[in-house]
Image (cartoon, rainbow, N blue to C red):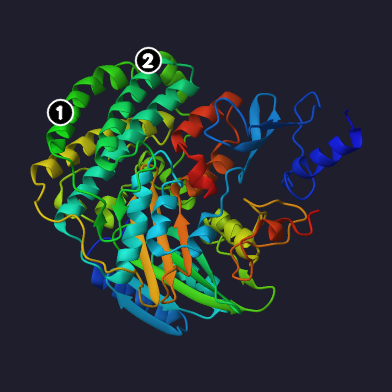
Amino acid sequence: MLDKERIDHQLEPSLSGKTGRLSGPDVRDEFGLEALDMNMGPQHPAMHGLLRLILELDGETVVRCDPVMGYLHRCQEKIAENRMYPAVIPLTDRLDYLANIHNEHGYVLAVEDLLEAEIPPRAEAIRVLMSELMRLASHIPSIGFLMLELGAFTPILYAFRERERLQNIFEEITGVRMMYHYFRIGGVKADLPPGMPEKIWEFIEGLEERFQPDLVDLIQGNEIFIGRTRNVGKMTPEQALEMGLTGPPLRCTGVDFDVRRDYPYGWYDRVDFDVVTDEAGDVEASYRVRIAECMQSIRIIKQVLQMLPEGEVMADMGRRIRPAEGEGFGRVEGARGEFAVHIVSDGSDRPYRVHYRDPSFVNMQLLQEIVPGHYLPDIMPIMGLIDPVSGGWDK
Amino acid sequence: MAISLPEGDLDTRLERYLEGFRDRHELEEHDTKGNALKVVIPPESLQSVLATAKEDLGIIHLSFITVVDREGSFEFTYELLDLRGGRVMIKTAIEGEEPVIGTATAVYPTANWHEREAYDMFGVAFAGHPDLRRPYMWQDNFDHHPLVKSFEISTRRTFEGLR
């Protein structure tokens, strides 16, 4: 039964009053019509996970875009405070679930910073190898998602074919297809299985061959793709830095920043790679940056495979991990940008405070700043530019 | 590109940052370890210290804001990066039942959502913030802040007062 009062009560706080609407001037067009409030999501077929956008439309132009988050909030930081240090690693897998290895990497780096631990070289090499495979497994589907949102169905099939092959490799190494829990404080869970380096090499060679026809030639020159993405979500490097963007959304504006090169961790100071930038700063540029970054990942993987050292994969960390009082930081270049972890220890076997800086969360500020002025259908390509993951922005 | 990123040796750069802060502000404590400069300041001078960091010293990126509940006081860490290997941690602490600190959004617009998150999780208010709403928790009739230490994990506690 429709109870008008109840419906009013439910709608009222979200669309006006103290929650939804920001105070702003009334937007009226030449016919004196008011701006239209519209909800996009939280369950929307094209939305990246559970995100609700409160939009204010003037005709087809977006006047205001207000993201509402929290539909997947699990309060990871609170759960982590009540667990022992090694037991937090599987939780970090659930943050950015399309690129979980980077989250694990950031967390274990922070704990190792607290413990001032030394990691065996083979473990560090394997970590870099896994991180770059993960970057491929995240960038390639994100190109596919962008095209799917623009209405092209074929690229997502090619993208998921590659991700499937990568997941098979991950499954052989870690035993799991998605929530890997492979990194440990002091190393990695297990050595690569016999024959794995050759298998990865074979996959990488095949991927290089398939990449150009399947993901570049099919998309890059396409007139519809250019029409929908060129000059859409356009921003200047100053704007991008002010919004705190990192990762491909920052590099597509031309700012030359990559945590792997500027704040090196693990083996990244021993491998040779370029930081890819693009000048345009729109959706098309972010697509080009992701494509070129896949090529750089392939380059890093080949170098690591060529100089993979022998030896242990796990340092002896003792039975119980109990760091001294202090702070630890871990910072990695995730697939979506800078992923940082800040741990405060009080000397017990549980962290006193864990803070995650997730790139999806910070990069989403772009929606508030850049979307106003664009047409309604441009929102989806802009989401493809940020490429956020629900588990990341909601923690 | 109009943005100039810093160049030169990391140690001299960190030294320059420290000199810059010391000349303009009163520091309670400072410490350099590895690539990080740690500066402890009184909460009143937070905004002017951040303005010094960005405008005079050219540290353009605010990476994150961490709040730690020390049961009685709240400790803030502002992690700034110069994007070329240098890290500056600005630390301050405030006390009281209903803590208020100045906002960083005027200097670093990206602090907007970081501060909203901190407000949501800890109940610390940021004076002068343009849009201080809770990003995660219920926006109405929910007075709890889950990351303070006095908040216990329990389903019953979460819904108390809502029903």
Which percent across, then down, holds residue B41? 49, 79
Q: Which residue is mark 1?
A: A202
Q: Which residue is mark 2?
A: A222
Chain of the residue under label 2: A
Q: Do pointers 1 and 2 mark residues of a single chain?
A: yes
Residue shown at 25%/23% (left/top)? Answer: A211
Callout 2: few (<14), some (14-19), or many (20+) C-alpha neighbours within 10 Å? Answer: few
Query: What is the three-letter code of the residue carrying label 2?
Result: Asn
Which percent across, then down, holds residue A361? 51, 48
Q: Quadrant of the N terminus of chain A?
A: top right
Is residue A275 visible in the rendered image? The answer is no
Vertical side of B139 occupied by B17: above or below: below
Is residue A17 visible in the rendered image? The answer is yes
Which percent across, then down, holds residue A208? 20, 26
Q: Quadrant of residue A42?
A: top right
Callout 1: few (<14), some (14-19), or many (20+) C-alpha neighbours within 10 Å? Answer: few
Element carrying mark 1: helix
